[in-house]
Amino acid sequence: MTKAEAPPASERQSGVDRVVDIFEELLRSRAPVRVGELARRLGAPRSTLYNLVNRLVAADLLETTDEDGAVFFGRAIQLYGAAYAQTNPLQRRAGEALDRLAAETDATAQLCALRGNKYVVLDSRNGRGLFRITADVGVPVPLPWTASGRLLLGHLSPGDITALIPPEDYRLPDGRTLAPESFLADVARAREDGHCVTLGLSDRFTCCLAAPVRDARGRTAATLCFVVPVDRDEGERRGLLDRLRAAADALSDPA
Amino acid sequence: MTKAEAPPASERQSGVDRVVDIFEELLRSRAPVRVGELARRLGAPRSTLYNLVNRLVAADLLETTDEDGAVFFGRAIQLYGAAYAQTNPLQRRAGEALDRLAAETDATAQLCALRGNKYVVLDSRNGRGLFRITADVGVPVPLPWTASGRLLLGHLSPGDITALIPPEDYRLPDGRTLAPESFLADVARAREDGHCVTLGLSDRFTCCLAAPVRDARGRTAATLCFVVPVDRDEGERRGLLDRLRAAADALSDPA
DNA sequence: TCGGCATGTCCAATATATAAGACATGTGTC
DNA sequence: GACACATGTCTTATATATTGGACATGCCGA
């Protein structure tokens, strides 16, 4: 879907498709990029990109940074995103749920989903605790690194899962490599349990708790999750998990 | 800039420009729209819009609603918007300031700016008070209806201002019509004072306090504002205004 | 039952947007 | 100074995206 085609693509391409490529590249980069650099990364002609970027800047979908001529997303996109967050039923209701969860528990609460073959945070609220563990919305993360990843794949067969996940994604940030079979077992258990908890997985000091938001067909459309320090005791975790599951169930479509 | 061209435009048009038009129309509409309806509103050929919309849906920039085939912004746009909010210096720092202001005062705090010839809320935090006065991000509002509007026009001459604002925008929601000269005087005074307060302007029961965020040239690039019930006493308002001005000054570029 | 109106897909023709390259200008390195 | 490399603007051609219209289908009301 959002599989980037690398430089090789040297065919004449449609403007809209190029625009999509520009947006995806800017999301990856998370920082302003010069037009020439953008052309290089996309394997696109410079003249084309100048043309497109100028049009997008005029429409306020992109902005040029004052200092150098680098471009990034513009104000219009912010407004479009806000309109989406307010209008999309799941996103809106989840946002309210996150507000409550973060306020009541002082933990970081997030809405997560599958995007391509990665996990992304769609929305997030920081608890008021001292340790503000804050993950970036929209940054792709390997599925095996996360509790939510185990839930989001619940509807896939083991074959589909191994086909989806690139081998390098089993290597955790701390260098350990997860056995694919072990991950498949995690996915199966998460489906059984209806939740998933990881301790010190993506990072030695954090505990992730996740619960599935299901669509009308019972598949995991998204997850709600808490990110807390690992040192919280078993009872606290239990309480957080209960809240999380209740909130996720309330967001789920009726079976 | 974002001046919509109505149906008359029956020339052959570029795909990217059509895409921009689609986005702007969806922002205006704030609800999913059928493709045929979209074509009618934009004065564009149906076949073109089906082509473009299908491409945008595939790229996740748009989503089709399950029930009917209506389309609206998609998840990708949400991620782009979040990347903007996090990366753009003003937007990011303002977001943090809003967090603090809303948390400390239990009022609704907003970041506002000029977009075309209207006022828009760019970002907003609700106070925890009982009266959650919540304005929608991205909805265009006539400039004379707002305190921020008076600050945002500070760098324009009276002639520019009257040229910019359409006559109907002087008519307030309650039916009263504001004299343009009176509005010009308000703008001048707001510039003198370095802030603006309105009581029961856009709505009988709300008080708006606004302070300017200035760019390097001293022009008002945006405003911070509080929205509170009118019944707060003078002293409270004074305190809120002081906080607001301090926060706005901190966001302003060094003169 | 029929007619009117909508959606969504497909096709062929032509106006035009994409692409390639030249050009002027600026900048840092040797 | 000369060189290599970057940016941003223009111009021209040709591959193709946009467009108008036809078509199949479905829904609603008379």
Image (cartoon, coloured by chain):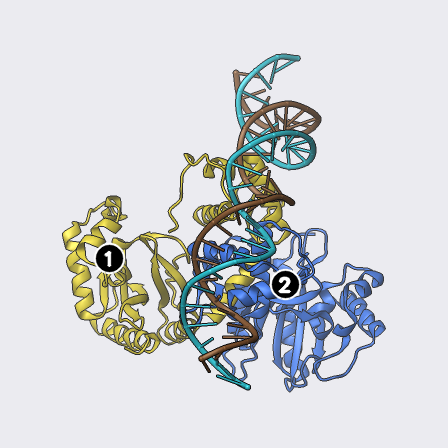
Chain colours: A yellow, B blue, C brown, D cyan
Q: Position of residue A224 (x, y in %)?
A: 33, 68
Mark linked to residue B165: none
Let me know if marks 1 and 2 both belong to one chain. Answer: no
Q: Which mark is residue A200?
A: 1
| Secondary structure state at the residue bearing disc 1 | loop
Residue under pointer 2: B248
At 48% from the left and 35% from the top, the residue drawn is A40
Q: Is residue B96 visible?
A: no
State which quadrant residue B239 falls in.
bottom right
Task: For the C terminus of chain A, give its image quadrant.
Answer: bottom left
On screen, residue A169 versus residue B80, left or right, reads left
Q: Position of residue A8 (x, y in %)?
A: 41, 34
Q: Position of residue B184 (x, y in %)?
A: 82, 69
Q: Amino acid at mark 2?
A: Ala
Residue at the spot 20% in from the left edge and 47% down from the top edge: A176
Q: Is residue B89 visible?
A: yes
How many circles with numbers are drawn on the protein? 2
- B187 horizontally vs A176: left or right: right
Please state if A40 lies on the left or on the right of B119 as rendered: left
Chain letter of disc 2?
Answer: B
Q: Nearer the viewer, residue B191 or A138?
A: A138
Of residues B11 and A130, the one drawn nearer to the viewer in this rendering: B11
Q: Residue at x 23, y 65 (%)?
A: A197
Chain where mark 1 sits? A
Residue B238 is left or right of residue B87, and the answer is right
Give, as a three-letter code, the residue at label 1: Gly
Give coordinates of residue B42: x percent, y percent.
61, 62
Query: Residue at the spot x=51%, y=53% of the render?
Result: B87
Task: Give the answer, above or below, for where B248 lies relative to A50.
Answer: below
